[in-house]
Image: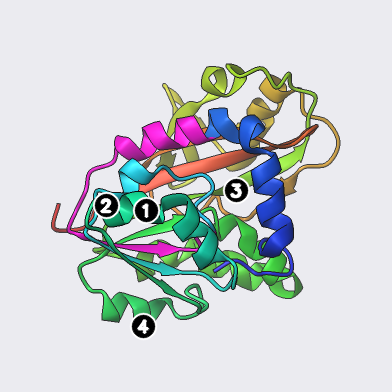
Amino acid sequence: MNSTDTTGGWRWHLRALLAKRRWQPTCAALAQWLEEQPQAGDTLVLIGPSAGWMMQTPWLSRYRYIEAFDLDPNAEGLFRLRHGRLLKRGGVNLRFHRTDAFDDLDRILTEYPKATLFFDNVLGQQIYRFRDDLPALERRLNTLSRQLAGRHWGSIHDWMSGPARANQAPDIVAQHVLDLTVTPSGYRLGDRTLSPERCAQELMAPLAAHGVWQDHLSSGIFPPGISIRLIPWAFLPGHWHWLQAGWVRGSGD
């Protein structure tokens, strides 16, 4: 579901391929987080998976059916190249749909009423697609959990990004992974409640952040009470992201 002119296309895939070693610690942290999440049902709807650069095949193999939605015309072939052989060996039925799942979400929810949904690093990228009306986008993201009420769903997405001087040693990601709980006004960390702005300020120091950081308007995606994990990502040399990962259990769990 990536916008191919800004967050998808061959430029993105080449970047991901060349950054494989630098991204590995973040991919490992994501893999661990996904393995910790409960499974519900046998169908997974993947929204914006691209080539699945940051996902691990064993987690995908939990499901019997995978319905993947991505606008990038290159996504399916590369995804199948990376994950297809092992998924097929495991009996997983994979189908790709080239459509805008973010705009077509109501139809998808109706078509797959019992499926688990996973937004793969796509919700934080919407600021580039809807840059002409960011307030409307923020309202849309903040009401997403109501749209998905009763469903089993998760998301990993950009929260903040910007320049930083952090050492890209392999263990720096694991050292700074942080678990919080969403509250009506921000996040709870231990016995403290932090606003999104205060939380962001405290996360800048571990990465030696400097300059101007981008807010991806994703702090209101998860409803209060949900546990989330913040994971640093060395996206480019000298440019880091904080990823926000969360999982919402459906009403039947």
Res 158 label: 3
Q: Which residue is mark 4?
A: 107
- Dot 3 falls on a residue whose secondary structure is strand
- What is the spatial separation of the Cα atoms under label 2 and label 4, in whole angstroms? 31 Å
- Does label 3 or label 2 sit earlier along the sequence? 2
Residue 219, position as x, y percentages in the image: 55, 49
Marks 3 and 2: which is nearer the front?
A: 2
- Does label 2 or label 4 sit earlier along the sequence? 2
Q: Which residues are magenta?
A: 27-50
Amino acid type indicated by mark 1: Arg
- What is the spatial separation of the Cα atoms under label 2 and label 1, in whole angstroms? 6 Å
Picture quadrant of residue 188: top left
- What is the spatial separation of the Cα atoms under label 4 and label 1, in whole angstroms? 30 Å
Res 85 label: 1
- Dot 1 falls on a residue whose secondary structure is helix
Amino acid type indicated by mark 3: Asp
Res 15 label: none
**Residue beneath the point at 28% across and 41% down:** 37
Tell me whether circle 2 and circle 1 mark residues in contact (CB < 8 Å).
yes
- Does label 4 or label 3 sit earlier along the sequence? 4
Q: Which residue is mark 2?
A: 89
